[in-house]
């Protein structure tokens, strides 16, 4: 087991290799920010291990792109909520009109022709 510092208590201890999968998106982004800060602060010690400025810059670019995509996704979610409300309101209006039409058809048209209007009622 590996103990990971700087993460919420609920996920500090995880089996090696499964830490990223156990994080929520917010926890993942917090972890990424901490990692980037640490990499920037200790670039000299890590250069010999393959983590140089290019690596850190690429990671930071990915981090920035994820923030942009997340913001776009949140905007789309908000738009979807608004559109769903509009759709539901329009459907309610249409249901009232259809109900009115059904009632009037049943009053004016013989039962034998109701199926032509999509009415499957028996009476």
Image (cartoon, helix red, strand yellow):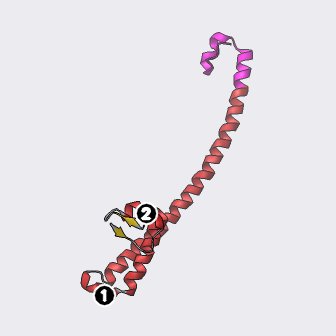
Q: Quadrant of residue 116?
A: top right
Going 26% across and 80% down the picture, which residue do you hit?
Answer: 50
* Magenta span: chief secondary structure: helix
Going by the image, does 68 lie left or right of 102? left
Kindly report the distance in space between the C-alpha atoms of the residues bearing marks 2 and 1: 27 Å
Quarter of the image with the N terminus is: bottom left
In the rendered image, residue 123, in percent from the top left (x then y), is placed at: 68, 13
64 up-or-down from 94: above or below:
below
Q: Compared with residue 15, is residue 82 higher up or lower down, i.e. above or below?
A: above
**What is the span of residues highlighted in magenta in the rendered image?**
101-123
For disc 2, the marked residue is 23
Figure check: 100 above or below 38: above
Read off the residue under disc 1: 45
Judged from the image, the secondary structure of the residue bearing numbered disc 1 is helix
Q: Position of residue 18 (x, y in %)?
A: 34, 62
Q: Is residue 78 left or right of residue 95?
A: left
- State yes or no: residue 8 in magenta: no
Quadrant of the image occupied by residue 113:
top right
Q: Which of 97 and 64 is in front in this view?
A: 64
Pick the front one: 61 or 119: 61
Q: Which mark is residue 91?
A: none
Q: How crowded is mark 1: few (under 14 residues within 10 Å), some or many (20 or more)?
A: few
Instruction: Assess whether residue 118 is covered by the magenta stretch.
Output: yes
Q: Do the residues labelled 2 and 1 touch (CB within 8 Å)?
A: no
Residue located at (69% from left, 23% from top): 102
Q: Residue at 37% x, 75% y: name it.
A: 59
Residue found 74% across the figure and 16% down from its top: 107
Of 108 and 87, the residue lying toward us: 87
User: Where in the figure is residue 79, as x and y percent of width and height?
Assistant: 59, 55
- Circle 2 SS class: loop
Residue 88: % across, % down: 64, 42
Other residues around mark 2 within 10 Å, as few (<14) / some (14–19) / many (≥20): some
């Amino acid at each position: 087991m590996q103990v990971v510092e700087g993460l919420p208590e609920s996920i500090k201890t995880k089996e090696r290799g499964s830490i990223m999968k156990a994080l929520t998106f917010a926890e993942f982004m917090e972890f990424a920010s901490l990692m980037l800060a640490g990499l920037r602060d200790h670039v000299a010690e890590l250069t010999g291990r393959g983590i140089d400025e290019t690596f850190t810059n690429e990671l930071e670019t990915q981090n920035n792109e994820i923030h942009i995509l997340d913001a776009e996704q949140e905007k789309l979610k908000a738009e979807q909520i608004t559109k769903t409300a509009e759709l539901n309101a329009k459907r309610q209006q249409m249901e009232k009109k259809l109900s009115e039409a059904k009632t009037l058809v049943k009053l004016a048209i013989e039962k034998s022709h109701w199926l032509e209007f999509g009415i499957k009622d028996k009476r």
